[in-house]
Image (cartoon, rainbow, N blue to C red):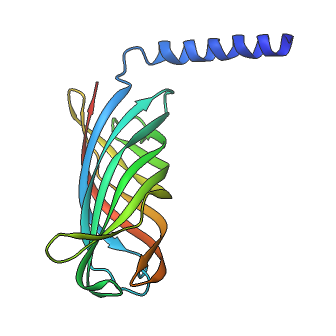
Amino acid sequence: MKTKVFLSIVLVILISATTLAQENEKRFGFELSSGVSMATNKLSESTLNPGFGFEGIFHYQFMPHLGVYGGWGWNRLGAEESFAGNDVCFEETGYVLGLQFKHSFGNSPVQYYLRAGGLYNHIETENSDGDVFNDTGHGLGWQLAGGIDVPMGKNWSFTPGVKFNSLSRDSEFDGVTRELNHNYVSLRVGFLKRF
């Protein structure tokens, strides 16, 4: 019992010290990013063309260099020929939640960031008219990301970076169940507002 009380007191002191140290810093933020995406493998034997996407995420920095992020993203990669037909697009949409590490380059105001998170996404297949004819349903995946945070003025930053998403889902096409391993790299340009 004494150990639990002692650990609780130490935890309260650490949280209080962290809060006081960050008193003048903005700990919340919202970031919008967009950019090009390139598949790193074939999607069930189909070659995907480069595509694009965007993401909106909220940040909360609970320690000087560590925080959480979460939000929603959309990414679209097309294929001229695929198992699902000709001239189709594969759209991955869903949610991300993870941890972010951020640190300055020496005494510079510019910081680098590293992110690792989990995805809860699905893959929709669209025809050339934009009609969805297949949906894998949501499932778990993962994301790794990194980049720099360049201050632009009062509570605004420019946040270019790169991210890697990985999602595996099963889906049925013409009576055949296919495993869709959707892996891609995105080069992103974003803007972050702290509040």
151 and 76: which is toward the camera:
76
Tell whether 49 sits left or right of 171: left
Whole-percent x, y for residue 115 in the image: 46, 48
40 and 123: which is toward the camera:
123
Q: Residue at x 27, y 67 (%)?
A: 76
Whole-percent x, y for residue 91 in the image: 30, 66
Q: Residue furthest front?
A: 175
Q: Residue at x 47, y 64 (%)?
A: 166
Quarter that holds the C terminus: top left
Whole-percent x, y for residue 24 in the image: 37, 15
11 and 76: which is toward the camera:
76
Whole-percent x, y for residue 92 in the image: 34, 62
Please say if 191 is above or below 177: above
Please say if 160 is above or below 49: above
Task: Report which quarter residue 161 is drawn in.
Answer: bottom left
Q: Residue at x 85, y 10 (%)?
A: 2
Quarter that holds the N terminus: top right
Please say if 38 is above or below 87: above
Tell whether 82 sits left or right of 119: left
Q: Residue at x 34, y 23 (%)?
A: 26
Please say if 81 is above or below 30: below
* Total marks in image: 0
Task: Report which quarter residue 191 is drawn in.
Answer: top left
Tell whether 1 sits left or right of 108: right
